[in-house]
Structure formats: structure tokens, C-alpha cells
Image: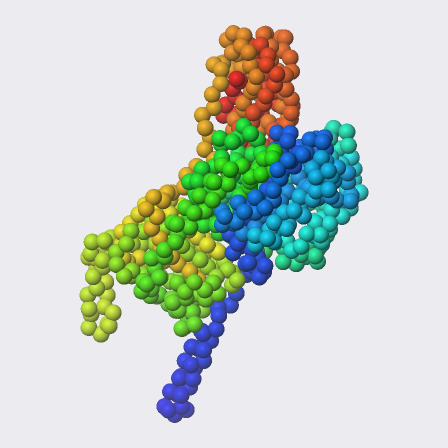
Amino acid sequence: MTTRQSLTALCLLAALTGQAQQQAPAPVGPLPTEHQVRWQQLETYAFIHFGPNTFGDREWGYGDAPLSSFNPTRLDCEQWAQTVKTAGMKGIILTAKHHDGFCLWPTKYTDYSVRNTPYKDGKGDIVGELAEACRKYGLKLGLYLSPWDRHQAFYGTPLYREYFHAQLEELLTQYGELFEVWFDGANGGDGWYGGAREVRKIDRRTYYDFPRAHREVWQHQPQAIIFSDGGPGCRWVGNENGYADATNWSLLRIQEVYPGYDKYFELTSGHADGDTWVASECNTSIRPGWFYHESEDQKVKTVEQLADLYYRSVGHNGTFLLNFPVDKDGLIHPTDSAHAVDYHRLVAAELKENLLLKAKIKASDERGKNFSTKNLTDDDYDTYWATNDGVTSATLDIILPKAQPINRLLLQEYIPLGQRVEKFSIEYFPLKNQGQFIPIKGHNMGVPNLLTLSRWQPLYVDEATTTIGYKRLLRFPAVTTKHLRIHFEQARGPLCINAVGAFYAPKGQETSVLANSRAALRGLPATVVDDADGQGVLLDLGSPQTIRSLHYLPAENGLIAIYEVYAGLSTDQMTRVAEGEFSNIRNNPIQQDVSFPAVSARYVRLKATRMVNESETVKYEKVVVR
């Protein structure tokens, strides 16, 4: 081969290599579906809990509430939709049937529905009314159908499985397009069950035939995302406090996770070695409880707490599902509405002006002009900066037009090609001495002066800088600089970053706040006498007192599921004054309040008749009486 032929071959090889690098990087699986990407782009949407529990002051109805009790006199689904729309949310998921078995639509499969209540003389259909309101206000509709049913006498039999699927088909076919179908993981336990009043247990993995339910959803609502502990569309985040871990993979080992998954704590960060794309949905209520309780009117999450949760849900590669407990009139309470709207406005103001729009951004590696750093600030989701094949670490060097205070950063991966980044870090150069460069002969750009290089400072962020995913939002104490570096240190493939942003929120929180802070719980002076052999707690008030309530603040474990409260003037003559269930305490261990008719007593005993975990003894942070 001649020298000229060799040069021609080399040029051709270089051209072919360059052309190959202009192609998009190969996907790194598991990958999301198009519907899953669109769902995550919604970012925030609302939950509505409403039903007989609202009127009975319960969290989990037993299934025996009289139909006559359900009679909202001012119910207005348009008020719900207007509130949600003004709060910047994109949709509403309604609890069409909760664990009590009551149906908010006139199902033909049970009498225990809105059809037999005073509401609109039995002619109401709250699911239908909400569907119309969502269409009017441009919101998406999702529906929650509880697999568990504490009302039906045949729960636990094969007949109930057919009943469950028949009701699912009604909801899938009668109310237009759905964006999400919600299957709760709470299944089996105490219930009314047609008057049997007993405990029924089922195999959560097999009883409901969830694969069949998934096929039904895909047949009638192919765009709908299916929620459960393990998806397959999206997953529970492992807590009801509304946040994901800073390290959050949108991946799960899907064959391991089932409704009621015992290792639910894993869901807060996902599985780095997962085989299926199942992103996290971060759900919480704007109040301590999911259903409305007048006693919680002064316990609505603050604007700052809600903003904090946005950063720790959407900003941690999840979505944010915020619940509104509709009140007895059938309306979202004005305090709840105001806080939701104000939090949205606060976050929008904090992230309004991207300070990097006019910045010069250079990358240590670039795949080609179609994948240049210009794509990072063009506001086009489907364009992105990418590195060459085999390059899994790189640096973005960012120079702003002028020095600016910054206390927020945004990073986004192009998730249609997979979640890749495993570790990153950020540096900034202090305002004084912005990094002088010393020209070196033969080097057009020069090299950094070692004296100034030593002045680079790591950006302090009070959380792990590991995964990015759909969106990562970082908060930190403000720094004033015009020079940033973002180091992508480790990834599962060539980098695909479709957005970066820097912002300054003058009054913004620097780090997370405790979104569910526990107010001081006070009661009558009392001494703990004993722990009732690990089955409860006995309080001595010192002298006879007139008492009307007991308040139990759970610990992290040793949770009471079913309880009895006894009171008396002596320990050998105590009368039971209350009994019941601390509903949903495993997933939402908030303060539990028990009221009873006024009684004179010196001694009060809280007794556990069943524990959430039968192998544990009772533990608590505080128990008081009033």
C-alpha cells in the first residue's frame, strides 16, 4: 500500500468513526416506556381521599359504616380541580374504593356504594363528576381501587377475586382516559366482612391475580401507569412521608417485590442492579392523616415543608403525589388549598431564572455537534449532551457572564436511553481570583495556574451526590462565583445529560427540613408504673382526675395495631373505656388520638391486643392522657 493509499484509508477510518459518534449512544437498560417518561414529566399531581371515613373520623374504615352517614352537602369536584390546577399539579387520583369497601361510583356489583346514600338522593357518581371536572380544567384522571375489602362477606374466597376484577373493568371503561391506576399494598386483616368481624389473611402475591389485573389495565387503558409496591408502572417509595433517598434508582428486581413487600425500606432508593424500570412515586398527605379530621385543621403541612418535599421527591428522581383529605362538606379545606398554592408559587419563584442560559459551557468530551453542550440549556427535552462510546466520566466547565450568588443546581439525564450516572461532584471558584490561566507555548488554551487551581472549592451539599435520573435538584448555602465545574465521576455508559441549571433563591432553605415534625405532646402529669409485660403501658396520675382522651406517639418499632384503653381508681378495678385499631400505623406512624366519655380515674392502661409485628413488645415515644 502506498503512502497516499495509507493516508486515504486513515482519513476514511476517521470519517467513519466521526460519523458513528454522531449517532445516539446505545441505550443502557433497563429502559422506561414512552408512557413512563411522559408520566414522570408530570412531576406533581394530587391524591383525593374521601368516603365514609370522612364522616366517621376514621383512617381505615372497618367496613360497617352506615350508608346514611355519607351525605356531603356542598361537594364540588370543580373546586377540587381548580385547587389542584392553581397549585401547579397535572392530575388527580381519587380513592374510588378504599379498604372499607365503599364505592364512590354506582357500581352494579354491590349495594355498598354512593347509589344507596342520601347524596343526590342516590343519583350521584363522584368518580364521574371528578372525571368531568378534570376534563374541564385540563387535568389527568387516575383511580385508586383497594384490593382489600373489609365490608364484603365473601372477601378471601375465589368469588371476591372475580368481584374485584369486575369492579376494575367498570372503572377502566366508564370514565375516559386514565393516567394512573393505583393498587394499595395494604391487604388482609381485621374487618367487618358481612358481620363476621374477624381476621382474614390472604396470599398477597397470588390471591388477587394481579397479572390479570395488569392485562386488563393494558387492554383498556394502555397509557395508564400501574402503581403498586413493585409496579410494574411505578412503585411506592417505601414511606408515606413524601420523599425519596438522594440515591434513587428507577430500577427494581421486579420478581422480588410484591404488594406488602416486607423489605419496603429498599424502595426508597430502588435497586441499582434492578432488571425493570419502575420509578418511584412519593406520596404523602398535606395533613397527618389521609382522611379529613377536624382535629388536624391546625396541623396542615407548612409552605416550607411542602417545598422541601418537592425537592426531595421530584428533585430526587421521583414524582410527588400530595393528598388532600376532602372535608365533610365535600370540599378541600381552605388552609390546605392556600398552602398547596403558595408552595407551588414558592418553588416556581426559586427555579424561575436559570443563570446558566448565557454561560459558556465546555465539556472534557463531546460526542459531536448533535450532542454538544448547547443542548444543556436549550429547553428541549429530547436534545442532550453526550460523550463518546467508552467515556463514562467527564467534566463540564461552566463560566457565567458575571459573578452570581447561587444556591440551587439542577441536573437531568435523558432517561429514554436509561439511567446512567452513579457518582458526581461539583466545584466552584470563589469570587476573588476566578482562576487565572497561564499561556503555555504550543497550547492555545493554556493550563491552570497551580496557585489558583488550589483555590477551587468543593460545593457543600448535605446529601449524597450519586444518582441523577429524570431530575436532580441540589440545595446548598449560597456561594458567589462565575465559575463552576461538574464532574461526572462514574456512570453505567456514555453520559447523556439533557439539562443543567443554576438558580438563586434569596430566602430559600439551604437543606432539608423535617417535613413531619412532631409537636410537643403534653398531658396530665403521670408516672409510668409498668409496661404490662411488654403488652402496653400503665400510667399513674397520682390522684383521681377526670379524663377524656389518650394520646399515643409511636416509636419506630414495637407498634400497636389493635388496642384497648382501661381506666380506674385502682389497678384491680379498671374498666375498658375504649378499643379499636390504629389504622395504617406501620406506614404512617403518626400520633394516635383516642377519645372516650369522661371518666374519673387515677390509673390508665393502654393495652395492645395485637401488634403490627407479633414478635415485638410495645414501644413508644410518649403516651399521655387528657
At horizontal 41% and vertical 46% (from top left) the residue drawn is 346
Q: Quadrant of residue 570?
A: top right
Q: Quadrant of residue 156?
A: top right
Residue occupying the far right of the picture: 159
At horizontal 39% and vertical 52% (from top left) the residue drawn is 351
* Relative vertical location of residue 339 with respect to residue 271 in this rendering, above or below: above
Q: Quadrant of residue 595?
A: top right
Q: Position of residue 323 (x, y in %)?
A: 55, 41
* Relative vertical location of residue 549 with respect to residue 125 in this rendering, above or below: above
Q: Position of residue 241 (x, y in %)?
A: 51, 39
Please state if 557 lies on the left or on the right of 163 as rendered: left
**205 or 168: nearer the viewer:** 168
At horizontal 63% and vertical 58% (from top left) the residue drawn is 223
* Relative vertical location of residue 604 with respect to residue 172 in this rendering, above or below: above
Q: Position of residue 475 (x, y in %)?
A: 37, 47
Residue 122 seen in the figure: yes
Total labels: the figure holds 0
Quadrant including the N terminus = bottom left
Q: Which color scheme did the rendering employ for the protein?
A: rainbow
**347 or 206: nearer the viewer:** 347
Q: Position of residue 80 (x, y in %)?
A: 57, 44
Please state if 237 lies on the left or on the right of 439 as rendered: right
At horizontal 55% and vertical 29% (from top left) the residue drawn is 294
Residue 245 seen in the figure: no
**458 or 285: nearer the viewer:** 285
Please state if 232 lies on the left or on the right of 474 as rendered: right
Please state if 466 lies on the left or on the right of 568 as rendered: left
